[in-house]
Amino acid sequence: MNTITSSKVPVVELPSGEVLSLKVIDIVGKKKGPMCYLQASVHGAEHQGNAVIYQLLKYLEKNEIAGSIRLVPMANPIALNNKIGTYTHGRFNSNTGDNWNRLYHDFTKDNDQVLEFAKKYLGYDELDIDKQYKLLLSKLIEDKKNENSNYGIDRNGHVNILLQELAHNADYVLDLHTGPVATRYLYVPEYLEEKCADLQFPHNLIIPNNFAGAMDEASFMPWINLQRAFKELGRDYDIAFEAYTVELGSEERISLEEAQLDLRHILHYLFLRGIVTEEDNPITTTIKKCKLKDYKTYYAPRGALYEYMVQPGQAVKKGEVLAVALNFENHFKEEEIKIELRANQDCIVINHYPSSSVPSGAELFQVMESIY
């Protein structure tokens, strides 16, 4: 069957001397094939991806694959262990306030080495190009790690570089996240809009082929930049690499039962990519898409206590009530205590704020509009 090994990669040493590490599990099949990389919980409160990794690992212990799969559960132990009361304060670096999923690097942007690589391999076939380019990516990541190392390692973003290093040799990258209170959905780069159907997720947000600091973008932008370099030299280069952000419901919870359903989507994808060799229970889903520009955020118009009248994944018509809120200050202004928030356009609700206690200006709902 498959060969399964595990290792740890040190991330940070605590003042007490204990070391927080990344847990890396590698599964290698007997037959050659592509590599898929999956990680979960870069945002420490987003746990469901770990349940999916567990279910996938149990599957891989009994079912042969071709190629290899690398699993990194609990991919940010700093964030995962950052608790305030009952809440995991794991979306932002508590020292700097930075979003953990905006601290990755695009090592290839405006990099002369990419253009020189394209010139050198202009006449090569794409399999050879892909193999050699991954070696260049490894070098660029190592150069970044060594930058200013004489003055110590900057903790802000260090875990992100380590994760990029673990993923750089993959053909497919799935970064597992959740929303606050959310449905299942994907972030999909424009160049993969057709291929993303193989994951059979019900809601797809189509994002530009640009870098904004996230793991999926850090993974696919080197290939976009290589394609652009080849284009300058007159060659059309077909990108075989794929990366997605996979949103698996709501934060601060896991469900092993739901993880079994999530796993069916991933196994279907891996089967179509030639890694999983058999598929017993294929899945079919109705897919709704919208462009990122049509992914709208409703900000709380008033500070109040909110009751959410619609559920994530629910379709809403223009004018329907999204939420009602109670603000007792209105009583002293001779206004209604109860306030209604209505939909501006037809939409599908993707997520909403995780608490009923909401300050004005908070991200109350995120919705898909102009759906196709």
Image: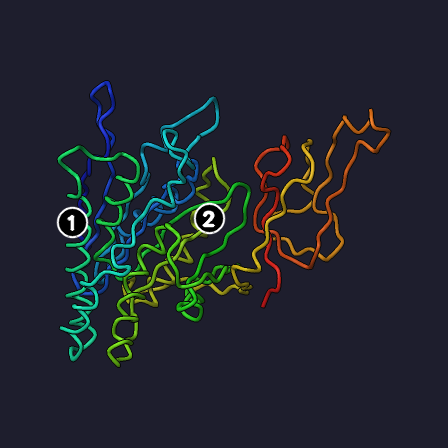
Front-lying residue, 67 or 239: 239
Examine the image and state in which quarter residue 10 appears: top left
Q: Residues within 10 Å of mark 1 (few under 14, many from 20)?
A: few
Q: Residue at x 25, y 74 (%)?
A: 230
In the figure, 249 relative to 149: above or below? below
Q: Position of residue 23 (x, y in %)?
A: 24, 39
Q: Residues within 10 Å of mark 2 (few under 14, many from 20)?
A: many
According to the image, label 1 marks what residue?
A: 143
According to the image, label 2 marks what residue?
A: 248
- Provide the secondary structure element on which disc 2 rests: strand
User: Could you tell me the amino acid type at mark 2?
Assistant: Leu
Q: Earlier in the sequence, mark 1 or mark 2?
A: 1
Examine the image and state in which quarter residue 194 appears: bottom left
Examine the image and state in which quarter residue 169 appears: bottom left
- Provide the secondary structure element on which disc 1 rests: helix
Q: Are marks 1 and 2 in contact (CB under 8 Å)?
A: no
